[in-house]
Amino acid sequence: MQPKQITGSDTFHLELNEGMDYLFSFVYVDESTLLPVDLTGYQAELYVRMNPGSAQVVKGISTSYSYLDGSIALGSAGQVSVSVSGSFTTGLTWDNGFYDLVLTNPDQRRVKLLKGRVNVYNTMAFPAVYSPSAFPGALELTSGKTTMPNGIDLFGYMNPLKMGIGGGLLFTGGLRPAFYMDHEIVELSFSGVSLRLTFAGNVPVENLLSMRIGSSIFTAASSGGRVFNGTAVGGLGLTFWEWRDVGNPFGDVEGWVTSVALTPVPI
């Protein structure tokens, strides 16, 4: 983007997000000739006030010093570069004000170069770094329904190889492994009494802080707790979570269900 040409006392509003870095570039040109003004030997100061004309300055940036809040650089071809660092907008008790950018020439004559509003928007509620491993996309599991010998309907997904079961129970997992948070799911079932989620291996509790199963949200804190069985099928070990007295996240279905989604939910 080309620097904005300014002729003096121009209006330019600063729209800033809290904690972010910015660089605003301008070229100061002579109003009559529109040629760049040589700013060698000039100084510049940017002052922020709560109200125009107020004697109280709440923030400032200058060519004279290199502040943590930012700096101003001037060039021989009219360049005016205003660098605003994240600390300039961090921890403020206000979110809007007014600023003036003033030039002082070698003869100590001053001219107001820019003026405008300063609006600061809160972005600090967002994470500094996004980690895809923390909240991956939803996992779609094919699930089904079968009636147990005791007459209780069993809904869900089961991998028969990992569970070591057969003979008409839910072979909904087939032979293809399904992974959630990089851990293989062995079972996701609802028996009318409880919801059970089983993983192969030793799964840390932080990987299941909160998740959406179907249309309902389940948290590790509301479960019966994490249980690791190191002597499970094939000696691979299984990690269980169980929720009692909860609704059926699979819905009221007959036979096979197309899918049920597992999605991480930020707390």
Image: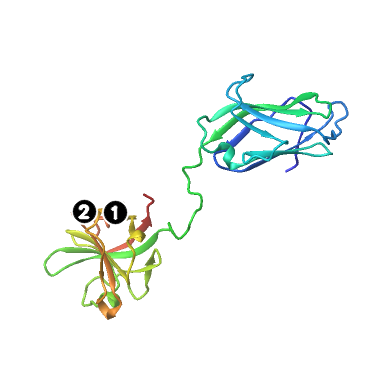
Residue at the disc numbered 2: 246
Report the quarter where the N terminus lies.
Answer: top right
The circle on residue 218 is: 1
Task: Identify the image's colour scheme: rainbow, by chain, secondary structure or one colour.
Answer: rainbow
Nearer to the camera, 192 or 212: 212
Vertical comparison of 79 with 201: above or below:
above
- Answer with the quarter of the image where residue 214 lies: bottom left
Give the number of callouts: 2
- Outermost residue, front direction? 65
- Outermost residue, bottom direction? 234
Q: Residue at x 61, y 43 (%)?
A: 21
In the structure shown, which secondary structural element does the residue marked by tag 2 occupy? loop
Residue 53 image point, x, y percent: 64, 19
The residue type indicated by label 1 comes to Phe
Q: Residue at x 25, y 58 (%)?
A: 253
Nearer to the camera, 245 or 96: 96
Badge 1: residue crowd in 10 Å (few <14, some 14–19, many ≥20): some
Mark toward the viewer: 1 or 2? 1
In screen coordinates, is 116 left or right of 78?
left
In the structure shown, which secondary structural element does the residue marked by tag 1 occupy? strand
The circle on residue 237 is: none
Vertical comparison of 247 with 186: above or below:
above
Q: CA distance from mark 1 to mark 2?
A: 9 Å
In screen coordinates, is 99 left or right of 126?
right
Residue 213 image point, x, y percent: 31, 56
The residue type indicated by label 2 comes to Val
Circle 1/circle 2 CB separation < 8 Å = yes
Is residue 16 shown to the viewer in this render? Answer: yes
- Answer with the quarter of the image where residue 42 lies: top right
In screen coordinates, is 163 left or right of 87?
left
